[in-house]
Image (spheres, helix red, strand yellow):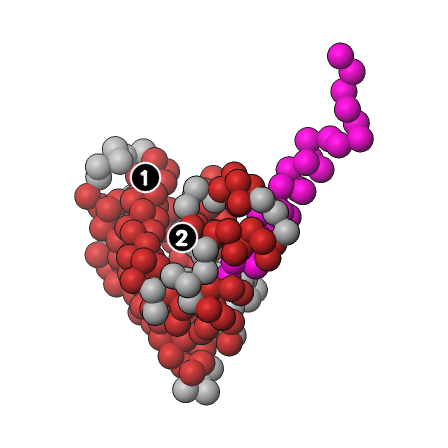
Amino acid sequence: MGLDMSNPPGLRNRKKEETRQAISNVATLLFVEHGFEQVSVADVAREAGVARKTVFNYFARKEDLVFDREEEVRVLVRKALADRDDQPPVQTFQSLMRTLVETQHPLFRITERPIQFWQMVADSPTLTARACELQVTLADDLTEMLSATAGRPQSDPDAQLAATMLMATLVVAYRQALRAFREHRKPEAALISVMERGFVGVDAALFGTPYVTASD
């Protein structure tokens, strides 16, 4: 059987990603405007011009329509750790976060839109619970990536400490940036200030481990 070159795999994957992003964008707009609990998956499907089943083909549950960038974070961290050369894992992670802030990556871009987004999350018990779950999940994933990079077991307490502290630092820094934006102060300055203080704490706590200290 010959290959169908009219729709190659790369194009199909790109179309799938575009469809996924379009559905997520529509869902977020509806949730922000009407509230998460007040909008059904059927409402999202109708507004996006797709079948309800199609929505679930891309998103396992309704909350995933809101928090749809976690895998992007994992990919960025994995790539940074894989390309790190001799830099210790924690410093590699910190350098990546600084770069994302400096380049105004959407994950750290503070505008009116994320203000509305997080207010929507705060107004929904379901989304608030899911946000807490994701913070724990991402910390666990970061623990696994850091320990693997350092050649230590996944249960290594140093990796767990580093990942938990790094995630907590980013959460607090982002919250302060949102507050600064609402108070008409510079959000990037607030974010960087808290982030760098947190990073100093992580470096001090993990000093002498392969996570922050380069091997001889």
Residue lying at the far bottom in this picture: please name it. 184
Residue lying at the far left in this picture: please name it. 157
In front here: 23 or 134? 23
Please state which amino acid type lies under the numbered disc 2.
Answer: Glu
- Residue indicated by mark 2: 63
In front here: 128 or 26? 26
Q: What is the quadrant of residue 119 in the picture?
A: bottom left
Residue visible at 46% across and 69% down?
34
Quadrant (top left/top right/bottom left/bottom right) for the C terminus: top left
Q: Secondary structure at mark 2?
A: helix
On whether residue 147 falls in the magenta region, the answer is no
Dot label at residue 144? 1
Identify the main secondary structure in magenta.
Answer: helix
Tag 2: Cα neighbours inside 10 Å, few (<14), some, or many (≥20)? some
Residue visible at 38% across and 79% down?
179
Give the magenta part as a residue range. Answer: 1-28
On whether residue 4 falls in the magenta region, the answer is yes
Residue visible at 78% across and 16% down?
2
